[in-house]
Image (cartoon, coloured by chain):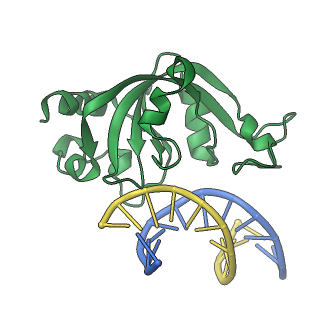
Chain colours: A green, B yellow, C blue
Amino acid sequence: MPSVITHWLVKTEPESFSIDDFLDQPRKTTCWSGVRNYQARNYMRDGMKLGHSVLIYHSNAEPSAIVGLAKVVKEAYADFTAWDASDSHYDPASPPENPRWMMVDLQFVKKFSRELALNDLRAVTSLKNMELLRKGSRLSVQPVSATEFATILRLTETGK
DNA sequence: GCCAACGTTGGC
DNA sequence: GCCAACGTTGGC
C-alpha cells in the first residue's frame, strides 16, 4: 500500500519569485499561481492538504538549491491568473466557469541557514530516487517521501 | 491514435 | 546562450 504523501517540493526561479520575495509577502503567505502542467496541478489539487510541508527550490539559480520551507495554508482553488489576458500565465482555455488550472496558498516557514545545492544532493545516497534528481525531471510540483524529507532537514541542520 | 513540429524547462 | 529532455498541439 503506497503511503500518502504529506511532503512536497515546489520550484521557483529566484529571478521571478525568490525565497526572499516570499518572506516579504503580507502574512508571509502567497498563492502558488502559474503552474501550467497537468501532473503538477494534480499534485496540488489532489495531494496538497492543509499543514503539509513544502520545500522551496530555486531553479535556474547560482546554484540551484533547496533554500527553505513552507506549509500549505489553503487547499486547491482556481488559479485566477489564467483569467487575466495581461498576465504571462493567461490561458483562455481555463475560464472562471470551468477552470483548468489550480493553485494553493503557501505560508513561509523558514529559510535554511544552509542551502542544499543540487550537486550536494546528488552526492547523498539516500536521496538517489528523489524526483528532483531524476534525469530530465521538470515537474515544478513534486512529492517528497517522508524519509527524503527527514534527510533533507537533517542536512540543513548538520550538513551531513 | 500516431507522430512531427513546436514550445518550455532548467542544468550547465 | 546552448541544448537535451519533456509536454502539448494539431494534421492526418
> Residue extending furthest front?
A24
Q: Quadrant of residue A40?
A: top right
Of A80 and A75, which appears nearest the observer?
A: A80
Quarter occupied by residue A18: top left
* Residue at figure coordinates x 26%, y 39% from the top left: A115
Residue A1 visible in the displayed image:
no
Q: Position of residue A66 (x, y in %)?
A: 33, 40
Left or right of C5, for residue A30: right
Q: Is residue A17 left or right of residue A114?
A: right
Residue at 73% in and 47% down: A87
Q: Residue at x 48, y 44 (%)?
A: A12
Q: Position of residue A24 (x, y in %)?
A: 49, 27
* Picture residue at 84% right of the left edge, 36% below the top: A98
In the depicted view, which residue is nearer to us: A160 or A7? A160
Q: Height in image: A149 above or below A38?
A: above
Decide: is A44 above or below A63: above
